[in-house]
Image (cartoon, grey):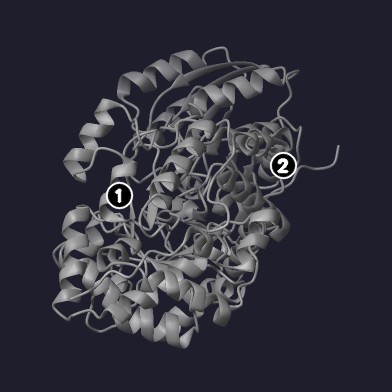
Amino acid sequence: MHHRAPAPSRRTLLTVTAAAAAAAVTGVIAPVAHADDDRKLQRIIDRMSLEEKVGQLFVMRVYGHSATAPDQADIDANLAEIGVRTAAELVERYHVGGVIYFSWAHNTRDPQQIAALSDGIQRAALARPTPVPVLISTDQEHGIVCRVGKPATLLPGAMALGAGGSHADARKAAQIAGEELAAVGIRQNYAPVADVNVNPANPVIGVRSFGSDPQAVAGLVAAQVKGYQRAGVAATSKHFPGHGDTAVDSHYGLPTITHTREQWAELDAPPFRSAIAAGIDSIMTAHIVVPALDPSEDPATLSRPILTGILREQLGYDGVVVTDSLGMEGVRTKYGDERVPVLALKAGVDQLLNPPRLDVAWNAVLKAVRDGELTEARLDESILRILRLKAKLGLFRQAYATRAGVDRVVGTEAHLAHADRIAEATTTLLLNEDGFLPLSPASHRSVLVVGADPASPSGTTGPPTTTLATALTELGFTATALSTGITPTAAKIEEAVAAAAGKDVVLVGTYNVSATSPQRTLVARLVATGVPVVTVAIRNPYDVARLGGQRATLAAYSWTDVELRAAVRVLAGRARPRGRLPVPVQNADDPTKVLYPVGHGLSYARR
């Protein structure tokens, strides 16, 4: 039977480490002197009830913009999915050690609101019998995965930074991202992606990866880790042991990676080794099967040979290991929701992220300890890593955000200018027949912009056709936008062809063009009008391999405003194209032939 020890004094908790104090003052993660600090942290663990210990292992979603007074619809969603009304109740009932923010959960309306939500969660946690601050996290990769939108600074995503090739820019982007997250109380970011995207058909990684070259990816991952550290935010490299070569999305199925152990060491491991060498604070697991690393064919998230044998013992990593979302199908296919969290802990995981039913997962871990399947010492080992990270981030010293801090840091002119400058260096000119680009309002004033308008990654930018047309108009062109969609209908294609009449040029925003995509028909019909066509790939650069007849093609790598505006400045000759492909583009009909190799990128002739 577990007896509750007396609660620690507030003084004990607030003076846990000198390193924490340094981090709070400077905003920089200070090195932790393990032995002395661990003793203080262990005293906190010793005072926790078993229920509090189990709670520390979970990072959970919760609906609502406020920790105590969310909208009724969010209260209803919380009751249905979690059995609590609010974030404060979530902390009170389940003692969760972490909370993850999502835009769809209405956590991220605007910076001041996010900071207030964070503070409400921390107030609830620090009012508990054993007051331990919550580690608040999100997926702010930038590019196509972004939870905090404008007026926060939006930055180029990983593949764009890969095209830019600058470690300094990658580090600066992470530092800006980290500073703005920290200002609103988010202290763990699930970025940078360390997957090496060697499969153009990868449906889940793609432009979220820095590229296909393991050493190039490794350098950029390390640069971003350093940037986040400067900002006092825990970076998380993902998805271990490497999700870059899969044609299955682990949100909806269980992918198998067929790399041999040697191929894994050569292709997938270098960015994770690099992240560990740079002092990465957390590593996220992948819901993938890698038979060469674990013949049991358990997903890596539940694999002791992979997480303990390789990550901990072979690579020497002793930081926090967090699962990818436990609500994803890839981790649920082989075992039920009750077994998954227990098996993850047995494999070597520390943080259990976003289970579909928290009551099921939480009680399963509690039962596993009471039944002797998991020892309390095993829980303590993970909790110590989690508390070390909280101390390192200064959360025991200062858990709260400030309104002044938000205003001083988030979306500043300096940050926005850096984002524009970094984005400008990433735009890649793939094709430029007879030097058609750059365009000039003097010769090609009238522009029709058509194409795909996918939903904004952050809910606050676009739509892309409008963003492109507006940016062209600001540079002296007369541009009109016509959204034709990701799968344009025959009627929409006819409308675009009619609208092209009398125009000087048509700009088409393409989005993941497949062999059967009607976007191919749209481009072909526009080319047939005789009006010059320029395409800009607003996601994967591979689109160019499935299109023909256009005069020029640019790759923007994402459809957030910062990348689209940069592409327009390049299009109009206000900036030189400097990006270089970080992945090869293969021939669509014969993938053994490379159309454009890694490093390809055209420039403009000096005029």
The answer to whether residue 159 is visible is yes
Number of numbered markers: 2
Q: Is residue 585 above or below residue 418?
A: below
Q: Is residue 596 above or below residue 603?
A: below
Q: Position of residue 224 (x, y in %)?
A: 62, 59
Q: Is residue 547 above or below residue 4?
A: above
Q: Position of residue 430 (x, y in %)?
A: 61, 47
**Badge 1: residue crowd in 10 Å (few <14, some 14–19, many ≥20):** some
Q: Given the image, on which type of amino acid does mark 2 rest?
A: His
| Tag 1–tag 2 contact (CB < 8 Å) | no
Q: Quadrant of residue 440?
A: top right
The answer to whether residue 251 is visible is no
Q: Which residue, given by chain and number where applicable, does mark 1 sit on?
A: 92
- Please give left or right for residue 534 compared with residue 9 in the image: right
Q: Nearer the viewer, residue 189 or 481?
A: 189
Please report the residue visible at 61 percent of the width from the left and 77 percent of the height from the top: 33
Q: Which residue, given by chain and number where applicable, does mark 2 sit on?
A: 418
Please report the residue visible at 36 percent of the width from the left and 20 percent of the height from the top: 492
- Please give left or right for residue 590 compared with residue 444 in the image: left
Q: Position of residue 18 (x, y in %)?
A: 64, 67
Q: Closer to the observer: label 1 or label 2?
A: 1
**Badge 2: residue crowd in 10 Å (few <14, some 14–19, many ≥20):** some
Q: Nearer the viewer, residue 554 or 464?
A: 464
- Please give left or right for residue 13 compared with residue 321 in the image: right
Q: Secondary structure at mark 2?
A: helix
Q: Position of residue 321 (x, y in %)?
A: 41, 70
Q: Given the image, on which type of amino acid does mark 1 rest?
A: Glu
Q: Is residue 589 above or below residue 269?
A: above
Task: Indicate the quadrant containing the C terminus: top left, top right, bottom left or bottom right.
Answer: top right
Please report the residue visible at 15 percent of the width from the left and 70 percent of the height from the top: 367
